[in-house]
Image (cartoon, rainbow, N blue to C red):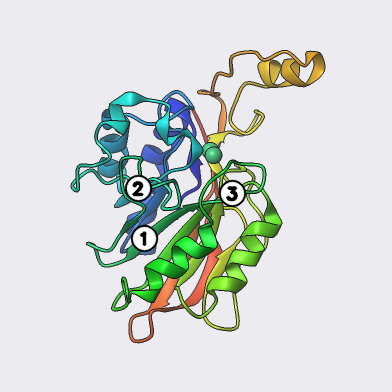
Amino acid sequence: MVGDVVGSGGRRTVKKVLPKLRHDLGLDFVVLQGENLAGGFGLTTDTVYEMVEAGANIITSGNHVWDKKDAVRKLDDPNFPVLRPLNYPAENPGRGANADGPVAVVNLIGRVWVGEFDSPFAAIDDLLAGGWGRSKPIVVDLHAEATSEKVAMGWHLDGRVAALVGTHTHVATADCRVLPGGTAYVTDLGMVGGTESVIGMHTEEALARFLTGVGHRFRPVETGPMRFNSVMIETDDSTGRAVSIERVDREVML
Ligand SMILES: [Fe+2]
Ligand SMILES: [Fe+2]
């Protein structure tokens, strides 16, 4: 599972790193967090298929999924490999869960400091109560700001899914573990974006916003050292639970 890929620098880094990782680590299935694929804000059809070509099987998203109309228009197409968080009100286009492939994938969004959504806890409970994805390993991306909300969801889902990973902060956390019930957990995957940046964006504009209190347009870092943050999860086919989770982090120069 690959952290938020930020802009063209992030996409070029994925193309440099992911095909080799898929081969060297013998990966069966890749979930990539794509809410920042296009210029740092939202995604487009072209950027989605660029990531599929690089080895992503399915793309999860978050609060930025609505930023570019091009992809929003495609969200209802069952063949478009993009999920939007399940617990956005149902009036919105798209789907938040997919069990068509060998791995069942769920996308949730948190409520603490992110927005007024339906409860992610109730949404996943409703989904799992119907036996959804039961024959497959289920992996969940909780796109959320607060570490506490993600830790709590880990315990809530322990023993019921193969993995619960966090995204959205763009800062990788060092707490990979398999919880006692067999659910792989990490608070945040991190990102694929510029190392010399503020969560993938040029430092000047990001700093200016903090120093002056006035919003400046953010631009993703596209050259220089780039960070690739991800985790590799191994599951047991007979139980659908996790055997291991470990960080797979790389740095490349663009
Ligand atoms: Fe993000
Ligand atoms: Fe986000």
Callout 1, which amino acid?
A: Val
Q: Position of residue 190 (x, y in %)?
A: 58, 47
Mark 2 sits on what residue?
83
Mark 1 sits on what residue?
105
- The label shown at residue 31 is none
Callout 2, which amino acid?
A: Leu
Dot 3 crowding, Cα within 10 Å, few <14, some 14–19, many 20+: many
Residue 138 visible in the snapshot:
no
Kindly indicate the quadrant of the structure image that contains residue 209. top right
Q: Quadrant of the N terminus?
A: bottom left
Mark 3 sits on what residue?
144
Foreground residue among 120 and 54 = 120
Check whether the beta carbons of the residues at disc 1 and disc 2 lie within 8 A of each other.
Answer: yes
Q: Can you say whether 157 is above or below 51 in the image?
A: below
3D distance between C-alphas at marks 3 and 1: 17 Å
Foreground residue among 46 and 161 = 161
Q: Can you say whether 177 is above or below 217 in the image?
A: below
Please tell me which of labels 1 and 2 falls first in the chain: 2
Foreground residue among 25 and 166 = 166
Please tell me which of labels 3 and 2 falls first in the chain: 2
